[in-house]
Image (spheres, helix red, strand yellow):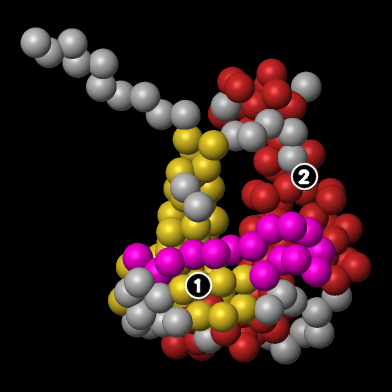
Amino acid sequence: MDDNLGTISLCYAVRYERTSRHSADRLWKAISRAEEVSAWMDYPASIDLQLGGAYFVDFSKASEGEIAGVICRLEPGRVLGYVWGWSVCEWTIEADGDGCRYTFIQNGLADRGEGEEGLIAGWHGFFDQLDEYLDAIPLDLARHRATWNERKAPYRSLLRAKLPAADEAGS
């Protein structure tokens, strides 16, 4: 008997593509070395850079969250992926002239309703912080927090447009 009820997807992904004037090697170091991740995220990090190793960032000084990931894909200098809860995060870096292009994707996100936009706006802010860190611009947390708050409404609108459940839960 084949009652093929196949495809159900209640998850979504976020994807960010950015360019950097810094080399792929420099960006790789900034995302794969704990001391550098700690510097641009402004949260303590520990990274065991091997398949099955931990990718951990402790957000407890600002909230109850953490990235408690396990590295599931590793191509040194090019790809870093880790499982975080039910989702998979993956950084991909490509050389582009003197700089590089990088892509970050987090797959397997389920809309939890109100507040989901904070996660997405948070990643956006972290990429801004990463870019500024690489440019040796001092971290301005007050400015980043204000920008994070401003970005939540546009991201909530995007979620409502893409996820019908977000409209019900977020209204």
Q: How many marks?
A: 2
Q: Residues within 10 Å of mark 1 (few under 14, many from 20)?
A: many
Rendering coords of residue 148 (x, y %): 79, 55
Image quadrant where residue 114 sits: top right
| Alpha carbon separation for disc pair 2 and 1 | 26 Å
Residue nearer the viewer, 43 or 155: 43
Q: Is residue 12 above or below residue 134?
A: above
Tell me if label 2 and label 1 are in contact, CB under 8 Å.
no
Amino acid found under the numbered disc labelled 2? Lys
Q: Is residue 33 above or below residue 141?
A: below
Q: Which residues are magenta?
A: 58-72
Numbered badge on residue 152: 2
Q: Is residue 67 magenta?
A: yes
Q: Quadrant of the N terminus?
A: top left
Question: For the point 40% across and 69% down, which residue is it?
Answer: 71
Question: For the point 67% across and 70% down, which residue is it?
Answer: 58
Amino acid found under the numbered disc labelled 1? Tyr
Residue 92 visible? The answer is no
Image quadrant where residue 63 sits: bottom right
Q: Quadrant of the C terminus?
A: top right
Q: Is residue 31 above or below residue 18?
A: below
Label 2 vs 1, first from the N-terminus: 1
Residue nearer the viewer, 38 or 122: 38
Q: Is residue 122 left or right of residue 2?
A: right
Q: Residues within 10 Å of mark 2 (few under 14, many from 20)?
A: some
Instruction: From the image, tell me which residue sits under label 1.
Output: 55
Q: Is residue 31 magenta?
A: no
